[in-house]
Amino acid sequence: MSITYDRIPNNVNLHEDRQLQRALEQWQPNFLKWWREVGPDGFQEDEIYLRTAVSVDPDGWAVYDYVKMPEYRWGIFLVPPKPDRRIGFGDYRGRPVWNEVPGEFRKELRRIIVVQADTEPASVEQQRLLGHTAPSLYDLRNLFQVNVEEGRHLWAMVYLLHKYFGRDGREEAEDLLVRRSGHPDNPRILSSFNKPVRDWLDFFCFAMFMDRDGKYQLAALAESGFDPLSRTTQFMLTEEAHHLFVGETGIERVVKRTAQLMRQDPNEDVTNCGGIPLDIIQKYINEWFSAALDLFGSEDSSNAAMYFAAGLKGRFREEDLWEDHVALQGSYVLEVPEPSGGMRTVEIPMRRAMNQLLRDAFVADCERALARWNKVLEREGIAARLRLPSQRFNRGVGFYAGYRFSPTGELLDEAQWQARRDEFLPSEKDRAYVQSLMVPVYERGKFANWIAPPARGVNGKPLDFEYVRFHHRSGA
Ligand SMILES: [Fe+2]
Ligand SMILES: [Fe+2]
């Protein structure tokens, strides 16, 4: 699995397949054009202290150095194949994994890859303006690190499309550069990836909740019986861990700063001193948590059942956490709303409940993070606590879509919802207030007033390290 530094860095012996190499080298300038058009706005000539994947060796897979973003070495890296790996679940359990696309599942597999792929450029587009209001050089650098790695995740998926799906794979790869987040006529595939990310609290919530959905999707695909998909998603998870860190510690730092400012004001009102009130943080959590829940799909899903049966997509840590890898027995019980009013109980056969099982694993992980943020409040001597809203709240997909629920999960009628909506989700006023705090802080070692500094810098560097070297701007 040695790395070749051709025009496209890779550990898949790309040079041995001239046709594939040529096809990807033709896609490369289109990718760069896309990056320049809708990637980070500005900053393309600046030198960013970035890590670049150079190996899949767990100790030493990345190097850190100053890079101009358009010169980032986006590459294709798969972890080495496990000898004699077998399909771990579903109807084909125990058979050797597939190294070519199984013909009967070609369409489903392509769909899985395209949907995952589409989220990667979408997030870059959603975050493209944030550099202008970064709270520090450290945060600015982290934003761009996430952005370039989402670009690499797109490469990881496009490689699969080109290598294994022939002509229609190449067409899908082109379309990935054509759709645009939030575009009225040609939007990204999943609706949550068309939501605007307007400020840095949005960004931290995005990296916390939306990227965490990504972690669980990638983990389910790492179980796949289609071995190239498993091997590429395993390596993507290595990079993804940093995105989750940025989100989780980002919110933690905001919570910490808010708590400090609350103690300084006799009425615990942080708007007097430029902090973000806890109730606004709570509303942002409500918004992005519910948006992320939608990404898992319907609670009762025949597609999910089919993906499991076919061995294409497993559960979170299928091998370690589950005993019955066939899942033809048992069911998942859920309270769902009735069109005629009230709630009823449904029993979903296990295989059809795979989306919901993955969502539950995600929710448990989010609960862990919430407990951590609440520990910060406790340590700072603040009595209030943050919480996750009910899974029923503010949903656009599945049983709860089209109904109104409070964050604590009570069914509301439309009038009740309208009267209380601004208690649950950020109001225009909340958003305008947060926006008013978004002024860039580009001085080394300085942080915006609404956020605490992180515990440590990047890659052992101090907090006042020059994480971004701005190239000289005329007039600046
Ligand atoms: Fe990603
Ligand atoms: Fe990510």
Image (cartoon, grey):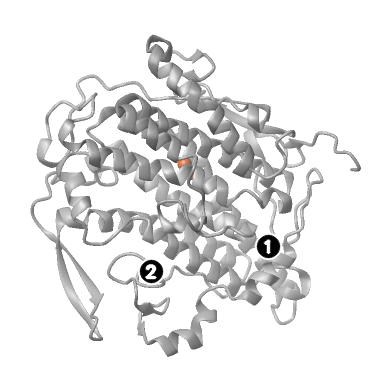
- Residue ranking furthest to the right: 475
Residue at image position (69%, 73%) is 262
Closer to the camera in the image, 206 or 193: 193
Which quarter of the image is occupied by the C terminus? top right
Q: Secondary structure at mark 2?
A: loop
Query: Compared with residue 338, is residue 199 higher up or lower down, i.e. above or below?
Result: above
Query: Compared with residue 248, is residue 242 higher up or lower down, i.e. above or below?
Result: above
Label 2 CB less than 8 angstroms from ligand 2 = no
Residue 337 visible within the image: yes
Image mark for residue 395: 2
Q: Position of residue 437 (x, y in %)?
A: 73, 64
Instruction: Find the distance from the CA under tag 2 to the CA under tag 1.
Output: 31 Å
Q: Position of residue 330 (x, y in %)?
A: 10, 58
Q: Quadrant of residue 263?
A: bottom right
Neighbour tally class for label 2: few under 14, some 14-19, many 20 plus, Cα within 10 Å: many
- Residue ranking furthest to the left: 329
Query: Compared with residue 403, is residue 309 higher up or lower down, i.e. above or below?
Result: above
Residue at image position (27%, 28%) is 227
User: What amino acid type is highlighted by mark number 2?
Assistant: Arg
Residue matched to label 1: 257
85 relative position to 209: left or right: left
Closer to the camera in the image, 382 or 225: 225
Q: Secondary structure at mark 1?
A: helix
Tag nearer the camera, 2 or 1:
2
Residue at image position (10%, 40%) is 91
Closer to the camera in the image, 475 or 353: 475
User: In terms of sequence position, does the residue under pointer 2 or pointer 1 come before the other?
Assistant: 1
365 relative position to 102: left or right: right
